Image (spheres, grey):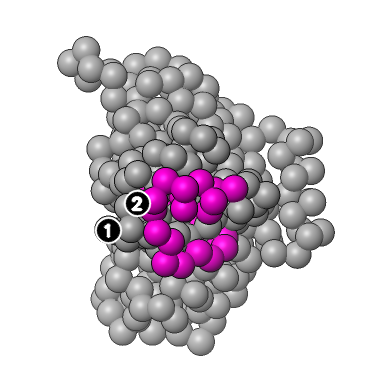
Amino acid sequence: MDQDIKKEKNKRRENKDPVLELSNVKKTIRKKGIIKGIDLSVYAGEVFGFLGPNGAGKTTTLRMIVGLIRMTEGEIKIGGYSVKKDFVKAMENVGCIIENPEMYDYLSGWENLKVLASMERGITKDRIKEMVSLVGLEKRIDDKVYTYSLGMKQRLGIAQALMKRPKLLILDEPTNGLDPSGISEFRHLIRSLAEKENLGVLVSSHILGEMEMLTDRVAIIRQGSIVKVTSVDEIIKEKGITYRLADPLKAKSLIETEFNGQVQIRDDEELVAFVKEEDVPAINQRLFSKGIPLYYVAKNQKSLEDLFLELTAGDEIV
């Protein structure tokens, strides 16, 4: 991403109120804490990733944000409006797509947008045309929706979600079913819309490589708690050292104990260690002195997947 764009997004976070703000949000079911006091902020113009293993509380959190279930404690604000105290105004500021958007297949794309516009106040014909242009459906908007590809239906769904000019767009598993070309097009569309519409975008997905390319920042939730909020740029700045060696378990213990490194075992002969680059020669020497033969050593960048596995201990992602 261009450095000037990054600086501008940082200024927005510093100088503006968030479009989505969660403060000490908790959810308790049958005296069991499902969500344990999470804090989260999403700002206009940024794409924010929300990741979590199966059962971590990600879906529960998304449902609380859009008012499908009530929080036990805490505060959620969308566009400055409290979901608890000013629900209608809060919901006016959010658009949401959960996996594949629902629409009338027997109507054209334009007719679908007109049906939705008739249910909302203040959506003009010009606004509908504007959204059709923004999502790139001008050539097919008059065709029946049943003739659309899944990627085109996603574009139409985004147009539906943005017609009322929300400040926040929530996307849950938006690339499910899309082919690689469709995923790439979707990524470019979302990044463009975040900038042009000055949207805050909260997106969840199990495709970690795609989230790394799409998002500006990410939060990782595990067992009902946020364990990390960071920028994608900060993740990929970290360097890892890949080792192929005879005893990964013994090597892991040594690196973590003596060099304060973070280590992931990949298989029976491979691990990745996140350590200071200047410590690598000493690590290699200590491994040799401990009788752990090295077959291969290479430097590599840390990925979002590396961070996720490191923080969730390999739990299944959904």
Q: Badge 2 is on which residue?
A: 248
Residue 206 lies, in percent from the top left, at 35, 56
> Is residue 167 among the parts visible in the rendering?
no
- The verdict on residue 131 being magenta is no
> Judging from the image, what secondary structure is the residue with disc 1 in?
loop
Which residue sits at x=54%, y=82%?
A: 138
Q: Residue at x 44, y 72 (%)?
A: 183
Which residue corresponds to the image point at 61% horizontal and 53% vertical from the top-left?
281
Give the Cα distance between marks 2 and 1: 7 Å
> Image quadrant of residue 42?
top right
Residue type marked 1: Asp
- The N terminus lies in quadrant: bottom right
Three-letter amino acid code of the residue under disc 2: Pro
**Residue 104: quadrant of the picture:** bottom left
Q: Is residue 78 left or right of residue 287?
A: right
Determine whether label 2 and label 1 are within 8 Å by CB: yes
The kind of secondary structure element at disc 2 is helix
Q: Which residue is mark 1?
A: 268
- Please tell me which residue lies in front, 297 or 311: 297
* Magenta stretch, residue numbers: 282-310
